[in-house]
Image (spheres, helix red, strand yellow):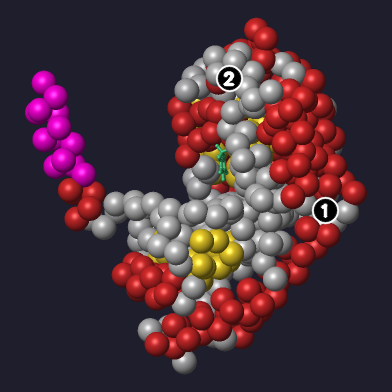
């Protein structure tokens, strides 16, 4: 049997390669940071990690994790409801709820699981989920697992959302679902207007803050802070795998009855292992650090503004952003790959994205800023973009 199947896989894989869609993985031998070492020995400046606050190799987090390793051991060997709940898990849940101004939190192994397990326990075929067309794959999968009626509105299009909300009046309960920051453009969901429409059409709101937590809002509390809506929406999901230290772990935070129901019925929570105590300990430390000082958030905001302004001044076509994601528009797929490759030769690690990750004819290089970047790093990246941009006639 396997021989036939093997031939089939080899065939499909070669089609993926021929279509230019084959994903190669670059191997890093250093800790994640502003400057990383590749297995080729090349040292490059990293502008493609979700390491927004530069915490991936932060000494205080490493110390907190090491201490927990000694006091709490390595793994939990259990799901939460059998014997996988530690004091550190409970403390992190409470700290995350406070951070976002919510009532309670439930941890998952990843935000992919948080999104995969949030809809099915809460809504039935009598209800409606109204989802942004650019929502993350894990939201799409989670919605698929739920029997609620599905509505999809065009990205951040409030007229379309209103239309879908009118249609969804036929259902019992309505939940609007959106990413906080959309990862390819860096735009923020218009939560103020979503909140108004939710009030008008009697709907609840869920925001996935994976790319916005730690980043958006003056103190990094995400899009609910940006729009002064802290505590005013029902559900937030997020990850510990991006700005929040970058290790592993996800969460859903929200109204206490919602979280209580998820603890009873959410399948990725009930049937999957607890996060390691050392990850919970580092998460607690991370929130303490962000409560004591706004230094990292301020630096990230400064770096983003600095980079954007210099790049626009240099003549690049930059999508307006409200996050730490800066899309340098090139439109041409081949050009995006060539430019990323030449930038790597200059020691700048960025990724070019093209169809089907972004719409046809919308190829771009996505730059992700970090509080780990020093001004010299930004200046070096901007200079490299200008040099290669001129060579490739992207700018004059
Ligand atoms: C990265 C991301 C996730 C997945 O988070 P993990 O914790 O890595 O599983 C979910 N939603 C959004 C919007 C993301 O950007």
User: Quick check: can you spot residue 330?
Assistant: no
Q: Out of 93 and 262, give the one closest to the viewer.
A: 93
Which of discs 2 and 1 lies nearer the camera? The answer is: 2
- The numbered dot on residue 219 is 1
Disc 1 on helix, strand or loop?
A: loop
Q: Earlier in the sequence, mark 2 or mark 1?
A: 1
Residue 11 in the image: x percent, y percent?
14, 42
- Name which quarter of the figure residue 204 lies in: top right
- The yes-or-no answer for disc 1 within 8 Å of ligand 1 is no
Image region (quadrant) for ligand 1: top right
Residue 32 in the image: x percent, y percent?
59, 54
- The numbered dot on residue 26 is none
State which quarter of the image contains the N terminus: top left
Residue topped by disc 2: 273
Residue extending furthest toward the right: 292
Magenta residues, as a range?
A: 1-13
Q: CA distance from mark 2 to mark 1?
A: 32 Å
In-image side of 342 versus 202 (left or right): left
Residue 90 in the image: x percent, y percent?
78, 22
Residue at 16% over, 40% down: 10
Q: Out of 41 and 189, give the one closest to the viewer.
A: 41
- Name which quarter of the figure residue 119 lies in: top right
In-image side of 3 versus 206 (left or right): left
Q: Is residue 11 magenta?
A: yes
Dominant SS type (magenta): helix
Residue at 77% over, 38% down: 64
Q: Out of 211 and 179, give the one closest to the viewer.
A: 211
Disc 2 on helix, strand or loop?
A: loop
In-image side of 178 versus 233 (left or right): left
Residue at 51% over, 81% down: 384
Residue at 78% over, 58% down: 296
Task: Using a 10 Å C-alpha cutoff, classify the residue at mark 1 as few (fewer than 14 neighbours), some (14 to 19) or many (20 or more).
Answer: many
């Amino acid at each position: 049997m396997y021989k036939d199947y093997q031939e089939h896989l080899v065939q499909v894989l070669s089609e993926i390669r021929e279509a230019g869609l084959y994903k190669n993985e670059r191997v890093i031998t250093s800790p994640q940071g502003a400057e990383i070492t590749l297995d080729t020995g090349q040292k490059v400046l990293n502008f493609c990690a979700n390491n927004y606050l530069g915490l991936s190799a932060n000494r205080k987090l490493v110390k907190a994790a090491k201490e927990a390793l000694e006091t709490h051991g390595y793994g939990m060997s259990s799901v939460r409801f059998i014997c996988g709940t530690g004091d550190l898990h409970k403390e992190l849940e409470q700290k995350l709820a406070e951070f976002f101004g919510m009532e309670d939190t439930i941890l998952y192994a990843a935000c992919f699981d948080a999104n995969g397990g949030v809809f099915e326990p809460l809504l039935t075929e009598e209800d409606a989920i109204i989802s942004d067309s650019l929502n993350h794959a894990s939201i799409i999968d989670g919605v698929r697992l739920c029997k609620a009626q599905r509505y999809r509105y065009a990205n951040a299009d409030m007229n379309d959302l209103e239309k879908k909300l009118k249609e969804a009046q036929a259902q019992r309960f309505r939940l609007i679902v959106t990413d906080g920051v959309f990862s390819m453009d860096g735009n923020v969901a218009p939560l103020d207007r979503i909140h108004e429409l939710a009030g008008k059409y009697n709907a609840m709101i869920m925001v996935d803050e994976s790319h916005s937590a730690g980043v958006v809002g003056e103190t990094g509390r995400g899009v609910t802070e940006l729009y002064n809506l802290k505590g005013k929406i029902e559900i937030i999901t997020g990850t510990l795998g991006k700005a929040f230290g970058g290790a592993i772990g996800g969460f859903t935070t929200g109204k206490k009855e919602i979280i209580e129901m998820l603890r009873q019925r959410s399948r990725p929570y009930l049937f999957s292992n607890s996060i390691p105590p050392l990850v919970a300990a580092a998460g607690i430390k991370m929130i303490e650090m962000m409560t004591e000082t706004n230094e990292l958030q301020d630096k990230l905001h400064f770096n983003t503004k600095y980079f954007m302004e210099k790049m626009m001044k240099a003549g690049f076509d930059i999508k307006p952003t409200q996050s730490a994601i800066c899309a340098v528009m090139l439109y041409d797929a081949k050009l995006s790959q060539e430019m990323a490759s030449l930038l790597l030769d200059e020691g700048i690690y960025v990724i070019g994205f093209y169809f089907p990750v972004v719409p046809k004819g919308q190829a771009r290089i996505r730059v992700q800023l970090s509080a780990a970047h020093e001004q010299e790093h930004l200046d070096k990246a901007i200079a490299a973009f200008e040099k290669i941009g001129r060579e490739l006639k992207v700018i004059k």
